[in-house]
Amino acid sequence: MRGLLDLLRIDTSPLTRLASLATLSPHAGRGKHILLSMPLLTAEVGATILEIDVADITTLDVAAIVNAANRSLLGGGGVDGAIHRAAGPGLLAECRALGGCATGSAKITGGHKLKAKHVIHAVGPVWNGGTANEEALLAGCYRSALDLAAEHKLASIAYPAISTGIYRFPADLAARIAVGTVTSELAAKPRGMTRVVFCCFSTDIAEHHKDAFAELGLA
């Protein structure tokens, strides 16, 4: 049986890197919020393509985007607020009927005015120094979202960097958990997924995701 590393192939060719860099704003510095029209890095896990992008998650053309939600599911700041604003008031109305969501789990709604047909609301943990099962709870967000996507026969999904904003989860550790969880889950059970996007809000966050691939010996 092939191991996990045998199932992964990373596209790091010079042409791919140059094409990606060409999409950067010439005025964008490290850590700035910029948009890219091409992935920074791609990999394959079986039949699934993984991408690391710097982009506005609300604009992505995927079957589902994941919202970094709070337990109420009634909107908030950061990615959560941006998704609710882009989706329109119908999303909040649908979320009100869900009765909230436990930390480490997820619930699904329609996409309303978004390009994505669905929003998967995953509730990440607040970082408390690593003493409150935060790592397992964060992994649960990524796993639950994959399971919900599979249950609804969705073939593509985009994740934000869950819990790395006001919840203060260390961005490097969060990226390792995100990439490691998704990769291992898809290697064990593909779920019909053809595309997974790690959608980063800054180049710093994207670098952490790239480092996570490298730590697996893939880049």
Image: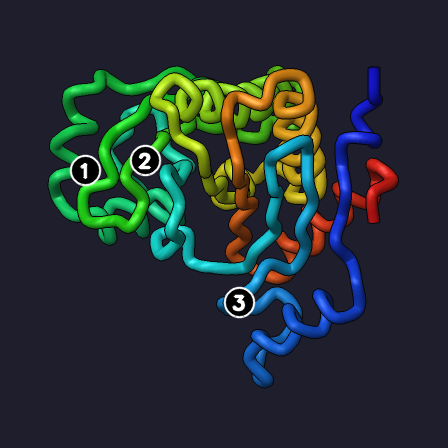
Q: Which residue is mark 1?
A: 91
**Comes first in the chain, label 3 or label 2:** 3
Q: Nearer the viewer, mark 3 or mark 1?
A: 3
Q: Position of residue 125 (x, y in %)?
A: 51, 26
Reply above or below: 65 against 131: below
Q: Upstream in the sequence, badge 1 or badge 2?
A: 1
Q: Check contact, mark 1 vs mark 2: CB within 8 A.
A: yes
* Contact between labelled residues 2 and 3, with CB atoms less than 8 Å apart: no
Q: Secondary structure at mark 3?
A: loop
Residue at x-position 54% and y-position 19%: 140
Amino acid at pointer 3: Leu
Q: Which mark is residue 63?
A: none
Single out the residue that lies furthest toward the right. Answer: 217
**In terms of sequence position, does the residue under pointer 3 or pointer 1 come before the other?**
3
Q: Quadrant of residue 190?
A: top right
Residue 36 bears which disc, if any? Answer: 3
Q: Is residue 186 left or right of residue 60?
A: right
Q: Can I make out residue 96 in this image? A: yes
Left or right, 76 with reference to 89? right
The amino acid sitting under disc 2 is Val
Identify the element where label 2 is drawn: strand
Residue drawn at the location 12% of the way across and 39% of the way down: 90
Q: Residue visible at 62% across and 62% down?
A: 203
Question: Residue 37: x, y in percent?
Answer: 51, 67
Residue under numbered circle 2? 119
